[in-house]
Image (cartoon, coloured by chain):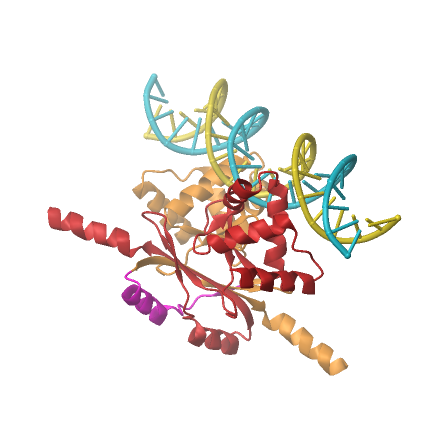
Chain colours: A orange, B red, C yellow, D cyan
Amino acid sequence: MEERIERIKKQLHAASYKLTPQREATVRVLLEREDDHLSAEDVYLLVKEKAPEIGLATVYRTLELLTELKIVDKINFGDGVSRFDLRQEGVAHFHHHLVCIECGAVDEIKEDLLGDVEQIVERDWNFKIKDHRLTFHGICHRCHDVDEKENEAE
Amino acid sequence: MEERIERIKKQLHAASYKLTPQREATVRVLLEREDDHLSAEDVYLLVKEKAPEIGLATVYRTLELLTELKIVDKINFGDGVSRFDLRQEGVAHFHHHLVCIECGAVDEIKEDLLGDVEQIVERDWNFKIKDHRLTFHGICHRCHDVDEKENEAE
DNA sequence: GTAAGTGCAAATCTTTTGCATCAGG
DNA sequence: CCTGATGCAAAAGATTTGCACTTAC
């Protein structure tokens, strides 16, 4: 945790930004809830627990800054809000998501499944890929298991 | 064109909705601009050219209805607006997009490139896939060509 | 007649901005 | 000081909603 904060601090400095207490509090929340997909509002509420004086605008500005520096990724699942995900360190590619249409859970796929597909796209569409977004919508293993049990019970 | 309208009319009726003149005008705009990725506002302005009395709320309601019936797909490229794409007829899968980070153009890939990947996900994550969203961000062939020319000129 | 559909305006929600103030070198 | 950063409130967008009116069967 501390090493990651330290690293992020360096990334900010390299781009001549400071790691202010507010920014640090925001980053800490993102680190603690790394597997959740927090909206700006979520982050704000969690930061506020530790640092009640912070303003929502600052959280937005911090998230924007972190996105710009590619420390976090801004994602969008189609509900009206943007969500923010810390990038895995040293992993260039953006992980994929599984969104359950029954329970709303969002799981992550950290493996990169798109290597072959990207080669095809680069070659056949003459498109230089810099990033990707891949989300599957369907039924997660938990809901799937529940469905099974219901069938058994019948 | 007319056959597609007819088909959509049937889909609406099957779900006990009517194809009102406003809805038809909206669908016609979507058909005419099938390769664009229109926002609700875009659609509204185009519909208004033909049927000036239509209200923005009606367009939103129509697009929501069409999304629900899976006649259109609602997509989101990370600029603050939702965009709407007519589904290809008889094509279950959702096509992919190439978003150029230089010029903002959005191209479509109509082939399904995810067959293998989906098999892996269904098997290894025990996730029943119903739909997917795949977008690549990068440099399109047009901007790429421009870059080449600039290099030659140097 | 009745239920669905519409137009308009107001309300809501997310995100951004202006500006006066604050903090650190 | 001086610059970047912050907090607050206001503004800006996008989308939704309430409601009275219209339209088709």
Quadrant showing the N terminus of chain A: bottom left
Q: Would residue A22 be seen by someone viewing this image from the given angle? A: no
- Residue drawn at (67%, 79%), measured in percent from left and top? A148
B113 lies left or right of C12: left
Q: Residue at x 68, y 75 (%)?
A: A147
Towards the viewer: A143 or B3: B3
User: Residue B31: percent from the left, percent from the top?
Assistant: 50, 56
- Residue at horizontal 52 percent and vertical 67 percent from the top: B89
User: Is residue A19 in view?
Assistant: yes
Q: Estimate the x, y position of residue B73 in percent, counting from the top left.
A: 53, 58
Inspect the magenta stretch and tell me whether residue A144 lies in it: no
Q: Position of residue A95 (x, y in %)?
A: 43, 62
Of D10 and A18, the residue lying toward us: D10
Describe residue A10's horizontal placement relative to residue A97 as left or right: left
Q: Is residue A105 above or below residue C14?
A: below
In which quarter of the view is residue A119 placed? bottom left
On the picture, is A86 further left or further right than A103?
Answer: left
Q: Which residues lie in the magenta part?
A: A107-126
Residue A45 figure quarter: top right
Q: Is residue B59 above or below residue A145?
A: above
Q: Nearer the viewer, residue B47 or B149?
A: B47
Looking at the figure, which quarter contains the C terminus of chain A? bottom right
Query: Total marks drawn?
Result: 0
Q: Position of residue A104 (x, y in %)?
A: 61, 61
Q: Is residue A125 magenta?
A: yes
